[in-house]
Amino acid sequence: MFQSFDVTASPEQGPPRLAALRAVMAAEGLDAWLTPRADVHQGEYVAPSDERLAWLTGFTGSAGFCAVTPARAGVFIDGRYRTQVKSQVATDFTPVPWPEVKLADWIAETLPAGGVIGFDPWLHTVDEISGLETRLGPKGFTLRPMPNLIDGLWTDRPAAPAAPFTLWPDELAGETAAAKRARLAEGLRAAGQRSAVLTLPDSIAWLLNIRGNDVEKNPVPHAFAVLHDDGAVDLFARPGKAAALTLDGVTHHDMAGFAAALAALPGPVRLDPKSAPQAVATALADAGIPWVAGEDPCLLPKARKTPVEIAGMRAAHDRDGAAMVNFLAWLDAEAPKGGLTEIAVVRALEGFRRATNALLDLSFDTICGAGPDGAVIHYHVTVDSDRPVTPGQLLLVDSGGQYLDGTTDITRTMAVGPIPQDAAPAYTRVLQGMVAISRVRFPRGVTGAHLDSLARYPLWLAGQDYDHGTGHGVGAYLSVHEGPQRLSRTSDVVLDPGMILSNEPGYYREGAFGIRIENLIVVEEQPAPPGGDAQRKWLGFETLTHVPFDRRLIVTAMLSDGERAWIDAYHAAVLARIGPRVEGAALDWLRAACAPL
């Protein structure tokens, strides 16, 4: 299987490791040490050899960090993980709601003025360190860059990934790597910049049309790169990883030579302070190389998918949709019998995806939460937590696949037998929010922050909400979480045609049930509606995901005529697209699931 159910960290491991870290801190004269969930490339996903936060604390979420002082150890987590963290860390660690509580404020309240805070400059971005220095420097605190203290304590640390990189076909990318390099180099020249340092793995993968196997579930290469203003690229990777790549204009180097190469660059050099490690900026500054803050030049071009990439994503979603329909038909027949567990459900779903003979990996570990486990937003089932799927529960399944032509991400919440109290109205509100995003038409210039509240409005009317963004960007056979586009209260990125996002409102009642419904959508140009302002440029969304909703949980009387019409039209499209791909009992199930409300 692609997914493991092993318990990788336990709360009891944390206290002795915390004590060992504090002993090293004292020997180094430190009053605090910062351990983020990050690697030197600053991508969201990290390899097992970089799971320092999980090693120290036991917390395995995809975002967060720990700040350790002699008396306190704060684990900073956002709204997605506030239930999960309770079961993963020992009482020696204190969960801290982040970003509501800022790290600088916490340190200032925890330590006396004048304290020394140690950090690994490869694991923190330029912006992170600059922000801490701005807020803590005037209070007498000192930030000290130094080798990572965890690495000296982690005696059984896994080896770094060693798999070689591969080429991703130009016919799936819709643009050659040479054309991409030339296009971005023109932008550098126009800005008067000699080069740009690239540290994000998915940016390098996109630019060079390569893929890697360095992070599970995300086909990204662990590498650094320098794009020059003539379109040439210097690629830095561990020995052997890029040996099989033959790309005109791309020169291979050992990763060990990256820092020295930075010191030899002609300036000015573009560096993205939001994602570049502080160590990169320090290396440039120490060598007297002028650098300018600027967005990673790959971010927006990568987000604006080519027509070829969008066509590939459609094909991947139709293939994945058929696997999901086969799975849901099976689940509807088996779950009411009471013999399934969460792990059995995950195994079955992976089996249906594997049966496509096109699955290369999952796009993330399947989230399968029965009853109260569904309220843990990023729940990961293990052999210890495996819960029976029994009648009278909701079952939330959030999953996706990596196919050569696209990446999928879909969530469906299903009733198993009798519907829990309050579940159907809440489900309907979540669905109404999802439909609102799907139907919206908006003028050019709108950001994800402008649209996020549309998905929450039905829930807000009922005094309900959810503690995560409404949608994240998604790559094309790349990372399932891709920036910079998002549907989020904090997103200021303008939505452009070709951007792919998730549309996934939810509602979670701790100890009872969780609800999330998710489709992937792509921004497209749309005409002005009749009587609308034709002089404006209008955008909307095409839905890529085609899998039925659970009709049993829809309170039809709560829907407006427009919402009901959209759901019926969506289900008709599902039947038309997926029906020819399934047969037998699954086709019968699909026809019933897609009948008009």
Image (cartoon, rainbow, N blue to C red):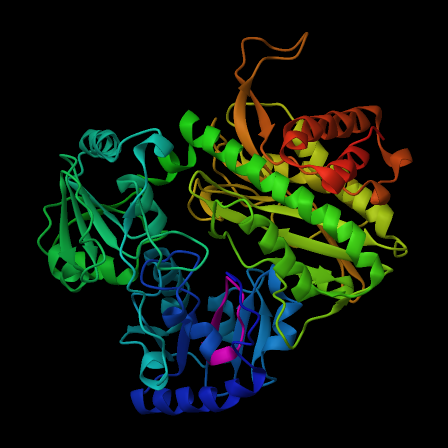
Instruction: Name the image quarter holding the C terminus.
Output: top right
Estimate the x, y position of residue 372 in percent, counting from the top left.
76, 65
Residue that extends furthest to the front in the rendered view of this protein: 584
Front one among 428 and 79? 428
Estimate the x, y position of residue 62 in percent, counting from the top left.
51, 62
524 above or below 475? Answer: above
Q: Is residue 214 left or right of residue 537?
A: left
Front one among 534 and 401? 401
Can residue 457 be seen from the camera position used here?
A: no
214 above or below 477? Answer: below
The picture quadrant where one finds residue 428 is: top right
Which residue shows up at 41% across the image and 90% down it? 20
Indicate whether residue 66 is drawn in magenta. Answer: yes
Estimate the x, y position of residue 287 in percent, counting from the top left.
11, 58
Can residue 129 be seen from the camera position used here?
A: yes
Q: Is residue 406 left or right of residue 464?
A: left
Q: Is residue 266 left or right of residue 84?
A: left
Which residues make up the magenta segment? 56-67
Front one among 172 and 288? 172
Which residue shows up at 88% across the image and 57% down it? 420
Which residue shows up at 34% across the image and 65% down it? 123
Indicate whether residue 251 is drawn in magenta. Answer: no
Estimate the x, y position of residue 415 in percent, counting from the top left.
82, 52
Q: Is residue 100 left or right of residue 255?
A: right
Number of numbered discs present?
0
Front one among 184 and 94? 184
292 above or below 514? Answer: above
